[in-house]
Amino acid sequence: MKKFLSLIILFCALGLQAQDRALQQQLRKLQMAEYAINQLYVDSVNDGKLVEAAIKSMLSQLDPHSTYTTPEETKELNEPLNGNFDGIGIQFQMMEDTLLVIQPVSDGPSERVGILAGDRIIAVNDTSIAGKKYSSDDIIKRLRGPRGTQVKLTVLRRGLKDLLNFNVKRDKIPITSIDAVYMADPGIGYIRVNKFAATTGEEFHEALVKLKDQGMIDLILDLQDNGGGYLNAAIDMANEFLNQKDLIVYTEGRSSRRQNYYAKGNGIFREGKLIVLVNEYTASASEIVSGAIQDWDRGLIVGRRSFGKGLVQRPINLSDGSMIRLTTARYYTPTGRCIQKPYQTNADGTKSDSGNQSDYNKELAERYQHGELMHADSIHLPDSLRYSTLKLQRSVYGGGGIMPDYFVPLDTTLYTDYHRQVSAQGLILKTSTNFIEGHRKELAKKYKDFNTFNRQFEIDEEILGYLRSEAEKLDIKFNQEQYDYSLPYIKLQLKGLIARDLWDMSEYYHVMNSNNKSVQAALQLLQSNNFLLSHLDR
């Protein structure tokens, strides 16, 4: 009931005037309904659930991105974007009902007390977790806690008979938003960003500095599968590429005046060829960056049409820690393109801008069925959605998402039923982890650096034999034809995972991108002295 009253007060505080008689009547109606149910209903009721259901129902009538989250959900949603959490600082994998440490976070709480990659944590605060079939979420809840508190870990270390005990003092653990930073080719840098969080602007700037120190002239910015995040982080990233007073994005809504966001002109990559990789899961803040770069003719967009999420949500915190994310405006690219795709099908089959979450969720599947993910010429857009870029007057289109300048079809040739089954059962990851556990010291001695490993290391029959035997234990039927077909990709995945465990995620993507069609297309474009790219290079 308190949350219900808080919600009413909140609506008033958001600019709803007391003299609006019609609104007062609706609020009284809502309050009377809740009061009547609470006082008169035949059975006892849960006030909290009633109020939450009412809020969710109201928001469901608006758009797909206006949402309500409980206090617990709000904390989980905000944590990845805040840039840190309190914990012990390890990357881990559940292997045969045991927690296997993949890597301790550099200079984190676990590394500081001596926990090593390959250690198995079998008990937390004297409570056994080995052989209990705990989920990763269950384990995380046991390991995380307020900064400064301690957790006792019992560890089994390979080569030692006795168990080891460590008292780990929890601390702030950084959550990075950049997966990979490396030189993809002489003069060509590569940065993959997984989200736009509180620290993304700073992380991205540091990545640019690092690559420039290594001789970067041109850049591939990988925003594939990046679902977005904070607007300010997108503005910080776009600022690295654009000139002073270049418009990055503007927002506008019924009750929100147009607000423009400009580049400051102090970015460190305002010259040099730039390619941005996008796909159907590239959304929101990622589309802001992509749209600004395309509209100002600063670089090429390569891949497939992005998701089309261009609605601005205002977070409204409620008294119990829950939150409403209410859509208050739309994003527009510098040329005036609306990023948001339509999200309701009317009775006559046309698209409009309200409601229908079900159709909205099916839209990506419809793209696949209509062939959009496979063929560049499958999309036919009206001239009313055509805009001209601001420097070269190239044609670009609105109507939802960012259309690529260079199309790369979805690669459906990598997988077979056999590969899908071993992947779904986690056997590729298990195989790489098992190999690392038995050969870590040998590999570290043999491969002093990643480049040597990348040139020389090959997945041998010992590793593949383990994979097949584990698959047989799970009754996955061996199919020679499918196995042979998927073998090159299986080997690549195994090599990438081994590289990740020996070094980090940058090395994983360095391996995997040798088979990523969008990355390879970007490299070819940069190496070919593409005519358009030469004109986009400031």
Image (tube, helix red, strand yellow):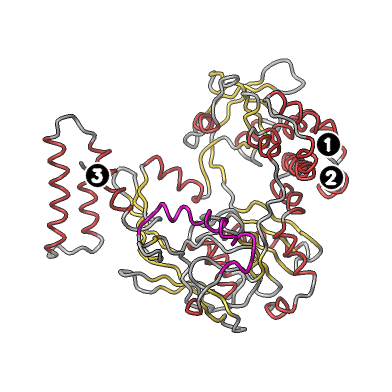
Tag 2: residue type? Phe
Left or right: where 331 falls relative to 57: right
Query: Are the residues flagged by discs 2 and 1 in contact, CB closer than 8 Å?
Result: yes
Tag 1: residue type? Leu
Report the residue at 77% width, 38% height from top.
483
Alpha carbon distance from label 2 to label 1: 9 Å
The residue at which mark 2 appears reads as 453
- Seen in the picture, residue 77 relative to 390 is either above or below; the reply is above
The kind of secondary structure element at disc 3 is helix
The one of 356 and 186 positioned closer to us in this rendering: 356
Residue range in magenta is: 355-379
The kind of secondary structure element at disc 1 is helix
Measuring from the top left, give residue 473's x and y in whole percent. Answer: 70, 23
The one of 297 and 442 positioned closer to us in this rendering: 297
Give whichever of discs 2 and 3 has the lower sequence position.
3
The residue at which mark 1 appears reads as 443
The residue at which mark 3 appears reads as 3
- Seen in the picture, residue 99 relative to 203 is either above or below; the reply is above
Alpha carbon distance from label 1 to label 3: 58 Å
Q: Residues within 10 Å of mark 3 (few under 14, many from 20)?
A: some
- Residue 359 inside the magenta-drawn segment: yes
The kind of secondary structure element at disc 2 is helix
The quadrant in which the C terminus is found is bottom right
Give whichever of discs 1 and 3 has the lower sequence position.
3
